[in-house]
Structure formats: structure tokens, C-alpha cells
Amino acid sequence: MKILLVEDEPSVAAFLHQGLTEQDYTVDLASDGLLGLSRAQTTHYDCLILDQMLPGLSGLEVCRQVRAHDPGVPILMLTALGETDDKIRGLDAGADDYLVKPFAFDELLARIRALVRRRTEAPAPKAPLRLADLTLDPAAKRVERAGQPIQLTAREFALLEYLLRNQGRVVSRADLLEHVWDLSFDTGSNVIDVYINFLRKKVDKGFEPKLIHTLVGMGYVMKTEA
């Protein structure tokens, strides 16, 4: 498996290069954002590992441009910026996962395996999901309510899809962390609450009935009744 590592700290880059190579990965290095973007756009990689703070071009911008070029390539953001807002910016830029420095190397390997496994698994075609006048089409990546298109980020779309697939059932924060964010974020983080609020503003605001409900201490449920 071939990995592109975009990291400007020489010691971190050398450590990761050695560790990943010892795990039989082929690793290409780029020490700045411009070189990383060029390599990502001209070479096929099975996974990208991006530092967020890079010279030349930020990791966020590299992520956005790579995602536009290759919507399916797994991208792991690796950075010292660990606040919730930093994570949200990384995920909204198109990253599939976010790991904060310092980190355990075994966790990095587990996250890489999870990202690559999801790409190689060929999912069956999914039928549109509906609740009241809300429709989500997984194949077309389109959401409408009362015939009006709703623009969602990739993470908002994944969160709404999971809630709709479990409509009528209470899903906990742990469920969402596992199935939407794949690997456990800090359980004390408010990233889920932030994204639920994003969805409410786009899916429920100005519409009736309200579909996204919070059960305090239990989780969230999508249903038509209060």
C-alpha cells in the first residue's frame, strides 16, 4: 500500500517514515503543502497523511484540492491543533479522520487500516431514505426537504444518513462517534453537539414537523412526533 506523508517537521517525518516502512507500507514524503498537492494529484495513493500547518500551502487547502481531484482517497489529518473547532475545520475540508499530536503510533496504524478498509469495501447501492418530507439520496449525495435542496458538508451528510437509517431509534453519542467518525474522538468533545446544531439549522429550521430530537442523557432520534 502506498502512502503520501506531508509533514514539515523533519523528526516527525523521519519517525513516521521509518515506522510505516517497517509495516511494509511504501511512503512518499513531502515537506510542504505545494509539493504534497503536486504529488497527490499526479500519483495514485492508497492513503494521505497531512499535517495541518504546512509551509507553502496549508494542510486544509491541500485537503480541499485533493478531495476535489480524488473524492475517494482516504485522508488523515495529523496535527498539533486539537481544539474542537480545529477538528471541525479539518473534517469540513474533506478529511476522513483527525489525529492530534502527540499520538500513539499503534493508533495511527489502526486509523490507516480503518480508512483503507472502508475504501476497498464495495458497498451495495443504497436506496433513498425518507422521513416526512425529507429525502436523502446516498447515491446522488443529495438532500431535499419539501422539494427544496439542502447543501450539506460531507460530515453533515454522513451524520444525517446515519440518523435516517436509524430513524425512530435513539442513537447515543458513542454510536455516532463509532459509525460517523469511525474511531473514537475525545468523548468529552462537543463536536457531535456542534454538528447536530448544524443539521438542525439546515434540515429543521423553517420546516414542520421538527425531525431531529435530543433525549437528554441518552442521545438523538429522528422522528416526526415530538
Image (spheres, rainbow, N blue to C red):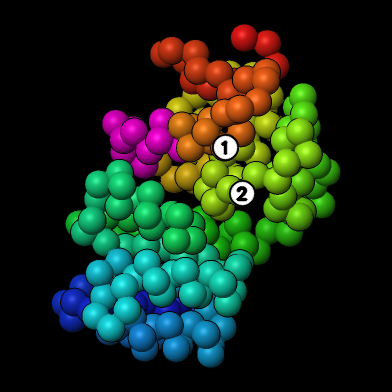
Quarter holding residue 68: bottom right
Up the image or down, 82 lies above or below 39; here it is above
Left/right of residue 74 with respect to residue 87 in the rendered view: right
Give the image location of residue 109, x and y in percent. Answer: 39, 61
Give the image location of residue 175, x and y in percent. Answer: 51, 31
Left/right of residue 179 with respect to residue 143 in the rendered view: left
Instruction: Name the mark on residue 202.
Output: 1
At x 48%, y 82%, the residue is 40
Q: Is residue 103 visible?
A: no
Can residue 172 be found in the magenta stretch? no
- The one nearer the camera, 97 or 66, is 66
Give the image location of residue 94, x and y in percent. Answer: 49, 61
The amino acid pointed to by label 1 is Lys
Q: Are marks 1 and 2 in contact (CB under 8 Å)?
A: yes
- The one nearer the camera, 180 or 34, is 34
Q: CA distance from mark 1 to mark 2?
A: 8 Å
Q: Which residues are magenta?
A: 185-195
Picture mark count: 2
Instruction: Name the mark on residue 151.
Output: 2
- The one nearer the camera, 148 or 24, is 148
Q: Secondary structure at mark 1?
A: helix
Q: Secondary structure at mark 2?
A: loop
The extreme front residue here reads 206
Up the image or down, 66 lies above or below 133; here it is below
